Image (tube, grey):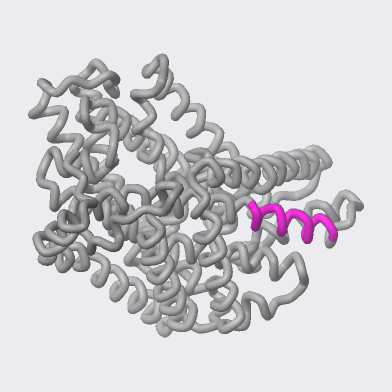
């Protein structure tokens, strides 16, 4: 499930937009950020009594339980925005595959399809995590592994047969030509692609050899980077930059490459579009279960009204999922209709940026908790450590925190190529959404004592 979260395909077109600079951003996100995330999360999850609850426990133990809830809330609510990004990609893929542009271009049709997808997936999740695991496994195989390897085959064949690349890759083009905000905002989709790895950390204590965790995460990092390079370069090398569509550019890359080798480009485009959509559907199913489980546990401690602490017969917090579904629908309407039918895919870009901005709040708190753990709580026993060197562990914490802050800041710069009106739309949607989400947990905490009493009276309170 963690692999399906990290190895994404819906960001390939966004990566391709950056051209050769994608290599630089992949290095920042995949090596300098992803590895500190996995190291910090792995060590915190291995502390005795910290294996359950994720960031709620880690931040809560280092600062306060209320701080832990805020971190958990940001982690939970970020995916309500992120799901809209993924669902827009799914709809755009089906739109391209079925030659029905109205599925994506007509805002009402797009929004209705968003409703169908999210509520359909929530209904499927009621059968438990084993069923979700099967969806993630099959979806990942059909929608990520097969399409990516096929794309690799086509792209290598494209290069070996002497076709001209539309981009130039060298030491001069890899680094950003300018360091302006409108260029650096290109980092957003890259860091988004590597978010979520902390979800695997609690399994460290279940491994026969906990030291294998670091090797597994490194292998996953390398695989994700290779996948991202294949996907982004195949688009950037074959489709002019101004023709790349953020939502479904990868689909047209398949058709373009296949046509060059006298294959049925239209058929390949349709087939891969459907497979890619299925892969992202599986990824959403993983995200529906993971963060909701943490919020369900928080509800048992009185951070939500008592009804959200209840479980169905399969142990699933149905009411928490329904709450998430409602928020997804509200955010979907805000992004879809607020941005309008712009050809620049403002709604898709804003959804990505808002997802990252919210998630970075959680990561800032997580790295702050890790920094405090390694410097003030050596007495806490843990079964795995990020490094035997305290200097290196501090380096993980500092580099991770700085890059997280950098990613948060650059989200508020409109991408290059936007008109003044489009920049205003982008910033309005992003800032309003971010400010609302930022303050919500503080409002909820005012009702914590009341909700705790309700949960205790209902016999649902969790003392652990």
Q: Residue 286: where, in percent of width, then height?
A: 49, 48
**Residue at the extreme right of the image, as rendered:** 262
96 and 74: which is toward the camera: 74
Q: Residue 244: where, in percent of width, then height?
A: 63, 64
- Magenta-tinted stretch: 267-278
On screen, residue 444 above or below 461 = below
Q: In what quadrant of the picture does the C terminus appear?
A: top left
Residue 271 belongs to the span the image colors magenta: yes
Q: Residue 146: where, in percent of width, then height?
A: 71, 42
Residue 273 belongs to the span the image colors magenta: yes
Residue 244 makes an appearance in the image: yes
265 and 454: which is toward the camera: 454
On screen, residue 258 above or below 59 = below
On screen, residue 41 above or below 362 = above
Residue drawn at (76%, 41%) of the image: 159
Residue 182 makes an appearance in the image: no
**Residue 421 falls in which quadrant of the image?**
bottom left
Residue drawn at (49%, 78%) of the image: 336
Is 137 on the left or on the right of 147, as rendered? left
Majority secondary structure of magenta residues: helix
Is 259 on the left or on the right of 372, as rendered? right
Q: Residue 391: where, in percent of width, then height?
A: 19, 23
Residue drawn at (44%, 75%) of the image: 335
């Amino acid at each position: 499930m963690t692999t399906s979260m990290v190895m994404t395909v819906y960001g390939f077109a966004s990566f391709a937009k950056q051209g050769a600079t994608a290599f630089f951003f992949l290095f920042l996100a995949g090596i300098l950020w992803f590895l500190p995330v996995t190291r910090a999360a792995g060590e915190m999850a291995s502390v005795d009594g910290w294996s359950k609850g994720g960031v709620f426990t880690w931040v809560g133990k280092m600062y306060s339980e209320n701080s832990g809830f805020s971190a958990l809330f940001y982690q939970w609510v970020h995916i309500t925005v992120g799901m809209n990004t993924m669902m827009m990609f799914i709809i755009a893929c089906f739109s391209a595959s079925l030659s029905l542009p109205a599925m994506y271009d007509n805002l009402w049709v797009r929004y209705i399809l968003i409703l169908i997808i999210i509520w359909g997936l929530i209904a499927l999740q009621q059968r438990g995590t084993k069923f979700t695991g099967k969806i993630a496994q099959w979806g990942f195989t059909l929608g990520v592994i097969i399409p990516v390897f096929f794309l690799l085959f086509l792209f290598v064949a494209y290069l070996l047969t002497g076709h001209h690349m539309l981009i130039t890759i060298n030491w001069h083009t890899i680094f950003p030509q300018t360091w302006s905000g409108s260029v650096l905002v290109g980092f957003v989709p890259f860091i988004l692609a590597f978010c979520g790895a902390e979800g695997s950390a609690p399994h460290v204590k279940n491994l026969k050899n906990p030291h294998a965790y670091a090797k597994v995460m490194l292998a996953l990092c390398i695989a994700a980077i290779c996948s991202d390079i294949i996907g982004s370069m195949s688009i950037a090398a074959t489709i002019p930059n101004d023709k790349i569509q953020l939502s479904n550019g990868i689909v047209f890359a398949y058709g373009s490459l296949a046509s060059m080798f006298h294959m049925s480009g239209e058929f390949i485009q349709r087939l891969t579009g459907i497979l890619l959509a299925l892969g992202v559907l599986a990824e959403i199913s993983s995200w529906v279960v993971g963060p909701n489980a943490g919020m369900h546990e928080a509800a048992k401690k009185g951070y939500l009204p008592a009804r959200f602490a209840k479980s169905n017969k399969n142990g699933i917090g149905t009411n928490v999922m329904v709450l998430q579904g409602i928020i997804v629908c509200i955010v979907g309407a805000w992004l879809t209709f607020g941005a309008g039918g712009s050809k620049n895919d403002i709604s898709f870009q804003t959804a990505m940026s808002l997802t990252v901005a919210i998630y970075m709040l959680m990561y800032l708190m997580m790295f702050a908790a890790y920094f405090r753990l390694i410097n003030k709580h050596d007495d806490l026993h843990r079964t795995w450590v990020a490094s035997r060197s305290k200097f290196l562990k501090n380096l993980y914490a500092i580099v991770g925190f700085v890059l997280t802050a950098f990613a948060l800041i650059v989200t508020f710069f409109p991408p290059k190529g936007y008109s003044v009106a489009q920049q205003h739309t982008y910033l309005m949607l992003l800032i309003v959404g971010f400010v609302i989400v930022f303050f919500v947990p503080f409002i909820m905490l005012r009702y914590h004592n009341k909700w705790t009493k309700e949960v205790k009276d209902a016999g649902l309170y969790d003392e652990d």
